[in-house]
Amino acid sequence: MNRRSAGRLLAAALTLALAALPAVVQGSGFQLFEQNASGLGNAYAGQAAGVKNASAIFFNPAALTRVKGWNVVASIEPIDLSTTFTNTASTGPYFPTPTGGKLPFPVPLGDTGGNAGNWIPVPSGYVSGEVASRVFVGVGVNVPFGLQTEWSSTFMGRFRTTKSKVQTVNVNPTVAFQVNDALSLGVGANYQHLSADLNQMVAYGSLAYGESAAAIAGLPLPPAVQGALLASILGQLGGPAGLAVEGPALLSGTSDAWGWNAGALLKLGKQAHVGVSYRSKITHDVSGTITFQGAPKLSEGGLTGPIGAAINAGFADGPVTTQIKLPDTVSVAGAWENEKLELLADWTWTGWSSIPALTVYRSGATTPVENVPLSFRDTWRAGLGANVKMNEAWTLRLGTAYDKSPVQDVYRTPRLPDNNRVWAAGGVQWRASDKVHVDLSYAHLFLKNAPSNLPNMDSATAVPVGDLIGEYNASVNIVGAQLSLHF
């Protein structure tokens, strides 16, 4: 294959991959191992050592040296996520009193929110080729991080979230060198675009009235005057019925950032490989807007003017910023094979502690408009897999993995109600010819039921959003299809 043809093929593959990228995705934590369908059949066990196509760009760039000639990979892994909530002792939002009592908001508790998951496609595309003796290049387009949960607008946790969507699109040019017959090295750059939508409901009427009441109580005025001022605020909200008014707050933003990845592959004798790969942290400085739909507009004149101005400012639309540090990852993997059997294993660590909280600021402000403690913990996963060559055309793939969640029980939110999981996976590869390979795979993820014990307020100064106490029930099914063309 000449370089001109390879360049056209590369451009076509990138165009198709970008066109196929989903609006939303969801994975473990919100890291996605679903970067090829050939590895899905092994639950992605041992990919940093055993991958034999251009998707090595993601799993271990040094393994590109195992892919002779030119290779184009197009893959898609639709994920079926089901997430529901079972209530045990949730409450609506309330203002705590100094004596330990509760002043509840006059809003309904709501329902359990329905199913927050759905079928979501996760595509990827790769092209690699040998451009000189022992020198290999490639580029991949994929979605390494993403999440989506979408609860109903009547969900009892709606004042925490209704819709959460984070998507990354990653372009990964790569070069690999075969240093000698035993050792290969590879390195890649990662240009990454991130977009996010974080929506929730706001109890506008109750919050405006409660905050006004607190401000008026602090004024050095006779009780009768304070009562008249509070009655004026209530009138501006539409009377008692206005206290139950709620509406959506919509937050969206985007960011572009760079990272890198590198790897090494060591051949041990004729049958074994050991691989080590690393993907760096990527820091996204996200800029966007927040919009409060249906928020009340209070008078900014007269005695209630300063109070109204403060309430209006709190519900004002405008630019916002936040920072998201996506975690780094280290994977150590081994592969051993003979003519009939290949065994795979890996251990992968992810530095999720890079995300301690979700903190959103208005542009130029030092006080956050939202601050959700997450306290993600560093995690690991371990996988085992096997490939059995049935004949010259067919290979059977099997695999399992244990995958820890970064979410701690005490901080679990309905934005990401994740928990530890066990993978059970299988698949087949059909080699239609030396140049055309097709992979079909399936995995089921068994997730532990996840408790929710969130308090009415995340801190003493936070906005009341209600106690969310119950349990999340989730299951995941993944199917995969991949076409690999060799030239």
Image (spheres, rainbow, N blue to C red):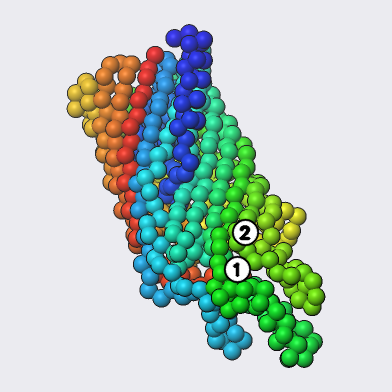
Question: Would you place residue 51 above or below residue 102 in this image?
Answer: above
Q: Is residue 43 left or right of residue 255?
A: left
Residue 404 is marked as none
Residue at 47% across, 35% down: 21
Residue 6, image x, y percentages: 48, 14
Question: Would you place residue 40 above or below residue 249 in this image?
Answer: above
Q: Disc 1 to disc 2, how far (Cα)?
A: 9 Å
- Residue most toward the left? 390
Evaluate whether residue 350 shows in this view.
no
Residue at 44% across, 64% down: 155
| Crowding at mark 1 (Cα within 10 Å: few <14, some 14-19, many 20+) | many
Question: Would you place residue 336 above or below residue 95 in this image?
Answer: above
Which SS class for mark 1? helix
Say which amino acid is labelled 2. Answer: Phe
Q: Quadrant of the N terminus?
A: top left
**Which of pointers 1 and 2 lies earlier in the amino acid sequence?**
1
Q: Quadrant of the C terminus?
A: top left
Residue 233: image quadrant is: bottom right
Residue 346, image x, y percentages: 38, 41
Residue 204 is marked as 1
